[in-house]
Image: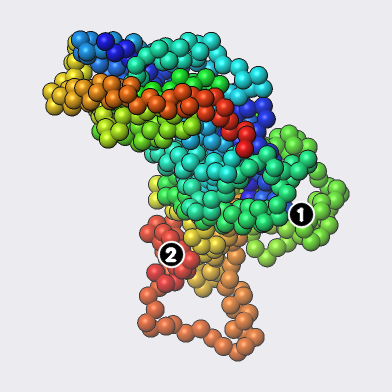
Amino acid sequence: MNKFIAIVGSNSNKSTNRELLKYMQRHFQPQAEIELVEIAGLPIFKKSADKYVPQEAKEIAKKIESSDGVIIATPEYDHSIPAVLSSALAWLSYGIHPFVDKPVMITGASYGSLGSSRAQAQLRQILDSPELKARIMPSSEFLLGHSLQAFDDNGNLNDQDVAKELDGLFKDFLQFVNISKQLNNANVVNKQKVEKFSWDKD
Amino acid sequence: MKLVGIAGSIADQSYNRTLLNFIAKHFEGLVDVEVLDINDVPMFNQDNDQTNSAVIQNLSKKISTADGVIIATPEHNHTVPAALKNVIEWLSYEIHPFDGKPVMIVGASYHTQGSSRAQLHLRQILEAPGVNAVVLPGNEFLLGKVKEAFDENGDLKDQNTVNFLQTTLQNFIKFAQVINLISKTEDYEEEDLSAKEGTDTTIQGVDMNADDWLDQAAKKVHAVDGDTYVKLDSGLLTVNQLDYFLKTMPVELTYVDENNQFIYYNKTGSAEDMLAKRVPSQVGDALDKVHPKISRVIKHVKQVINTLRTGKTDLVSMPVPGGDESKSHVMHYYKAMHDEEGNYKGVNEWAVDIKPIVDQYLHETGQKLVKDPNAEIDATSGASEKPEVKVDVTSSASKH
């Protein structure tokens, strides 16, 4: 069975993005093992001369390395992903590169009707950058709007159409992960390239 | 013009900070730039609101009072650094200092891109409703290959780059002036006649409505008096000479500062002999204290001041109602005062009886006044009775 790491893109205790990932964890239990990862404990990303990376980031990196894919649920703050998520991704691409060629499914929830659409668009661009170089599932988008009203008392999605949409996307993600495993001819080279890559060099 | 600069990096060594420091130094004559520090800002978290912390309040205050903001952003993973985004999150949560604020984006990077993608993200972020900054369109300044860009003094080596930077900065200054003019065109209702907000010249720690405000405030700031010289922009007078001079002006002068505080009048005589009755105990009062608490009067005062503050007009004039027209025709004039940079600094009000002037003119030229049969004069109406004069206050009451 595939094992996925699900990153909660918020550091708030009452995050509907966490709620969404918990729902996915439970609901898709027969199909995959999903482990939720919190990023709230990470400090703000800061470059240092000795390229220090906090232990917590290294541990998250290890989990991602050994997983079959990553699911990210992002809120939208000011049309973009929260600083805390941006910061986590910066740590997870600073001398360590767990995202290279890793299949990623982007989801997101917001209180309003837009469902973090702009944050997700930016997140795609961020995950495409040379030091993250993730394999984002193409042509797919899961935007959960009005997220405060989206779940019932048991944490299940109220709207059956929305639930069905997510079922379909998750099924696609499983296939995308399997296809990705076969598209690994350049992986070794990619890993080497990213190890050597530096914005500081020409 | 006063700008603040924010370097989007908290790294110990930041070329974006170098770039801002260069802008501040090189264009000193053009604009005043203060570079702010975002190093100690805590991670944004809705569950732990630190809006009121000193570091965030200080940033907010600096941005609020600036005429514009320059943000220099590096690029991390195709976006702005988390540290910069983090600051913007705090400044768009419970407080909104960027609202309506002109912003210019610049950026430097090691590679050829010069932070191009981060700058686009930053534009989207600054457009968000909670931020609502007004970002200078076009004028992209992307400084690529930054490691070779500066000399050992932190100056940009390439003259063409400096020239281009100057052009964009000049465009931004013009842009900021226009945006600030639009932002300042607030509704007159927002005029605070209680003067509680204060301004940089407001004397703190003294009750402005106290009868002896003048003595208390003068003591507080160690004001000079008597035969001490005061250098003016085109003259040198002692305080006594200034008083002799102002007291013999043929008009009654009143100084109301930009904070709506009445801080001076030229005491030409005792109150009963004055056209506009003023007494020394009123000096220092907030404007709401020197006007009757009648809503139409308050409304009209606010309209006049706001019209001047927002630059809709520079001069408001109106006759004082109820006088005997055969004896006098007292006019009140309100003129906006500005500093060298065009910032509103208050109202210069003068009252004058123009009847003797008109009489003298008629006498010396051998003319006399006759009634205009077509005129629609409402001689008894004063401005305070006609609050609807509103913004066309430039026209004198005789047109109403």
Residue A96 in picture, x, y percent from top left: 52, 19
Is residue B120 toward the left or the right of residue B314 in the image?
A: left
Quarter of the image for residue A99 reads top left
Q: Residue furthest bottom?
A: B366
Residue B197 seen = no
Taking the spot 22% from the left edge, 13% from the top edge, the residue there is A31
Label 1 neighbourhood size at 10 Å, few (<14), some (14-19), many (20+)?
some
Taking the spot 39% from the left edge, 26% from the top edge, the residue there is A185
Q: Secondary structure at mark 1?
A: helix
| Quadrant the C terminus of chain A occupies | top right
Residue B207 in picture, x, y percent from top left: 62, 33
Label 2 neighbourhood size at 10 Å, few (<14), some (14-19), many (20+)?
few
Going by the numbered disc 1, the residue's amino acid type is Asp
| Earlier residue among tags 2 and 1 | 1
Q: Secondary structure at mark 2?
A: helix
Residue B143 seen = yes
Going by the numbered disc 2, the residue's amino acid type is Asp
The chain letter for the residue carrying disc 1 is B
The residue that label 1 is drawn on is B243
Residue B396 in picture, x, y percent from top left: 47, 68
Taking the spot 35% from the left edge, 26% from the top edge, the residue there is A183
Q: Nearer the viewer, mark 2 or mark 1?
A: 2
Decide: is A83 above or below B181. Answer: above
Decide: is A181 above or below B235. Answer: above
Between B274 and B245, the residue placed more toward the observer is: B245
Q: Residue furthest front?
A: A185
Is residue B68 toward the left or the right of residue B248 in the image?
A: left
Between B317 and B212, the residue placed more toward the observer is: B317
The residue that label 2 is drawn on is B392
Quarter of the image for residue B129 reads top left
